[in-house]
Amino acid sequence: MDKFMYNRRRYIRTTAILIPGVSLILALVYFLFIDNGNNANLGSNIIHSIIMTSGIWLGCTVIISYLWAKIPWEHHPFKRLIIEIILITSYTVLFGIFVLWIGKQRGLISPEYKNLGSDIAITLLITFFITAIHESVFFYQQWKYNFSRSVRLEKDSIEARYETLKTQINPHFLFNSLNSLANMVSENEQATDYISNLSDFLRYILSSRDKELVLVREEIEILRKYADLQQSRFGENLHTDLQIDAAFYHYSIPPLVLQMLYENCIKHNIISSENPLEIRIFTNDNYIVVTNNLQYRSTVTSTGQGLRNITERYRYFTTKEVIIEQTKKQFSVKVPLLIVKS
């Protein structure tokens, strides 16, 4: 969960400390000012108030905390509002009836008590008022987090563009040179294919650099070309099994994610005739999985920056997490398939 969200356990512990004091204050205010000072049963009424307030407060805290994780406001605001109102109302009414029944059984509430409807209504109003304050604090924290993140990302974007400008070359010159080179070696089919794949790959990088998402079909097509380039380099020491069902081609992913994961497999593992590298790319439960057998290079130190970048990119588009799994023999990364709403 993002940093701007509360730690659930710590938040519940904090509210548990505040509940008795708030309950006592509410009980005193009610029975001194609303009940016209009729405090014959003040002790039992305070106990009843503490039980009622504590149960509702803790229950609503759990409900809101659960909804934060499952239905974020920024993704489904109307759905979140309706579900939160239904859950809090249902819980408050049912808990109020339950406490009333317990109170009558224990003698804390008079058997002639007939103000259930009005007391539940007042309790609901107080509950929604406190919930509104609670959510306002949450929104303020979220706004602060998003604002600082936006400033940081804007700074990173400017720096990245500056670095790109410093190293930029004329793409037309590059592709014309590659075409000329292909003509020079036209009699060598393997060299011609290599140059063609390299040209298509570089063209894709330039065309997709300003896109947030691309179709899986496009990404798979360019990944095949990139894999062919690497195959020309490593020969039989590199085995690539690319099995993406065409039924997933209409989904979207951030550009060059698969290429980066494929490149990481090659970068961090030994590739030799004695230790061939096997890379598999396939779909599983609306995820694309990139997996390889583990045979780490001792000379390469991983900072994990590439995987962190991929994870950050996905957080803009979905609440689904990028899943990273490692065993003694295998390393795999699962990236979610996205549906772009028109």
Image (cartoon, rainbow, N blue to C red):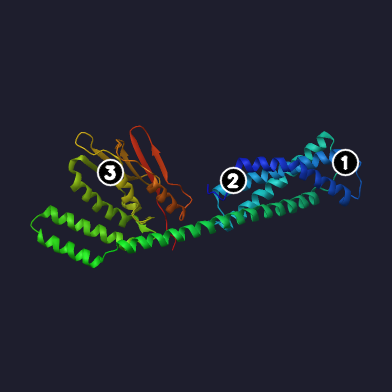
Residue 178's x, y, as percent? 18, 61
Are dots 3 and 2 in contact, CB under 8 Å?
no
Residue closest to the eye, 29 or 64: 29
Q: Earlier in the sequence, mark 3 or mark 2?
A: 2
Is label 1 in a helix, a strand or a loop? helix
Residue closest to the eye, 282 or 294: 294
Quarter of image, res 45:
top right
Q: Which residue is mark 1?
A: 42
Residue 339's x, y, as percent? 42, 56
Residue 254's x, y, as percent? 38, 55
Q: CA distance from mark 1 to mark 2?
A: 36 Å
Q: Amino acid at mark 3?
A: Ile
Q: Amino acid at mark 2?
A: Tyr
Q: Which residue is mark 2?
A: 66
Q: Nearer the viewer, mark 1 or mark 3?
A: 3
Mark drawn on residue 203: none
Q: Alpha-carbon neighbours of circle 1 within 10 Å: few (<14), some, or many (≥20)?
A: some
Q: Amino acid at mark 1?
A: Leu
Position of the C terminus, as image quadrant, is bottom left
Q: Is residue 110 visible?
A: no
Residue closest to the eye, 38 or 174: 174
Q: CA distance from mark 1 to mark 3?
A: 74 Å
Q: Residue at x 13, y 54 (%)?
A: 191
Quarter of image, res 317:
bottom left
Q: Residue at x 43, y 49 (%)?
A: 311
Q: Alpha-carbon neighbours of circle 2 within 10 Å: few (<14), some, or many (≥20)?
A: few
Q: Earlier in the sequence, mark 1 or mark 2?
A: 1
Q: Is residue 267 visible?
A: yes
Mark drawn on residue 266: 3
Side (left or right) of 141 relative to 332? right
Are dots 1 and 3 in contact, CB under 8 Å?
no
Is label 3 in a helix, a strand or a loop? helix
